[in-house]
């Protein structure tokens, strides 16, 4: 029986309980072809590629989320509600803000402040905090330590815009201890919280807003591989 989705052509059972979600669907293809055994493509609708394969004896899926909170929220909602996914781990890049955050660091996002209005739909009587799932966060931190991957753990800012006309914004974020800026984490965390499912955001610091430093294409590939491997270990451990 088909699932009521206009954005995902998968059938029930095609998608694993744990899903890695890069923003770029081509990065999803890279993860599948590089790390998964016998990957099968379950979605090509709108070129948002999704694959399921085996990793160390367990089924794991990887699928693109697109850019921004609305796109992440759409795909995460459908995965949780239509395909019975239990855990989603975002794997993406972020612009560093914090003084102690450096290029190539792996950032594990405890929570995400945001200027998005995404949370208004829940009619929460207060300010709803978008936070990660402790089980996944703890597992990822332990995996990164075992693998010797430089890691920072803290708050990120999920922005609704890539080019910010407010020149003072980054300084304000930094004053409040925000470590990096990106565009999807709050959407994922809020969707997971509402669905009572698990979510985590792992981000590679690819550039730094205050120092002007940025990774080369080759450095990005190496650093992103470390992030992918930590994510795969975390997804693997989340599965019974």
Image (tube, grey):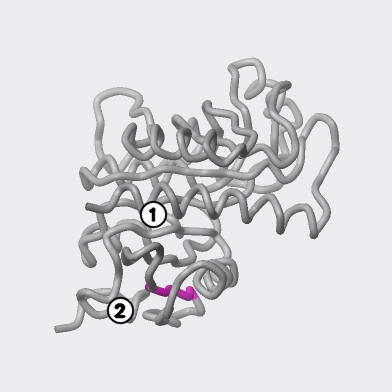
Residue at point 35% right, 25% down?
A: 127
Q: Nearer the viewer, residue 195 or 221?
A: 221
Circle 1 residues within 10 Å: few <14, some 14–19, many ≥20: many
Badge 2 marks a residue whose secondary structure is loop
Q: Between residues 36 and 102, which one lies in front from this camera angle?
A: 36
Does residue 50 belong to the magenta stretch? Answer: yes
Principal secondary structure, stretch drawn in magenta: strand
Provide the residue designation for mark 1.
73
Please check the rendered image and state whether residue 197 is part of the magenta-colored stretch, yes or no.
Answer: no
The residue positioned 23% from the left and 66% from the top of the image is 83
Q: Nearer the viewer, mark 2 or mark 1?
A: 2
Residue at image mark 2: 10
Position of 77 with respect to 151 (left or right) is: left
Q: Quadrant of residue 205?
A: top right
Q: Is residue 9 above or below residue 89?
A: below
Which portion, as a residue range, is magenta?
48-52
């Amino acid at each position: 029986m088909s699932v009521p989705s206009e954005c995902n052509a998968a059938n029930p059972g095609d998608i694993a309980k744990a899903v890695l979600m890069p923003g770029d669907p081509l990065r999803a293809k890279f993860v599948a072809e590089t790390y998964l055994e016998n990957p099968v493509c379950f979605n090509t609708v709108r070129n948002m590629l999704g694959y399921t394969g085996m990793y160390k004896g367990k089924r794991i899926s990887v699928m693109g989320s697109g850019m921004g909170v609305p796109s992440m929220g759409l795909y995460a909602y459908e995965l949780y509600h239509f395909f019975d996914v239990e855990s989603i781990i975002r794997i993406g890049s972020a612009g560093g803000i914090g003084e102690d955050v450096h290029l190539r660091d792996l950032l594990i996002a405890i929570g995400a402040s945001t200027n998005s209005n995404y949370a208004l739909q829940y009619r929460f009587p207060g300010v709803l905090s978008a936070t990660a799932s402790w089980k996944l966060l703890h597992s990822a931190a332990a995996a990164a330590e075992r693998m010797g991957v430089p890691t920072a753990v803290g708050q990120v800012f999920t922005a609704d815009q890539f080019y910010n006309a407010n020149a003072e914004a980054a300084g304000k974020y930094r004053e409040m201890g925000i470590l990096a800026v990106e565009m999807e984490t709050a959407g994922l965390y809020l969707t997971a919280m509402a669905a009572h499912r698990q979510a985590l955001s792992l981000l590679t610091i690819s550039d730094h807003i205050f120092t002007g430093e940025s990774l080369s294409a080759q450095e990005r590939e190496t650093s992103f591989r470390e992030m992918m491997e930590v994510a795969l270990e975390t997804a693997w451990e989340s599965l019974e």
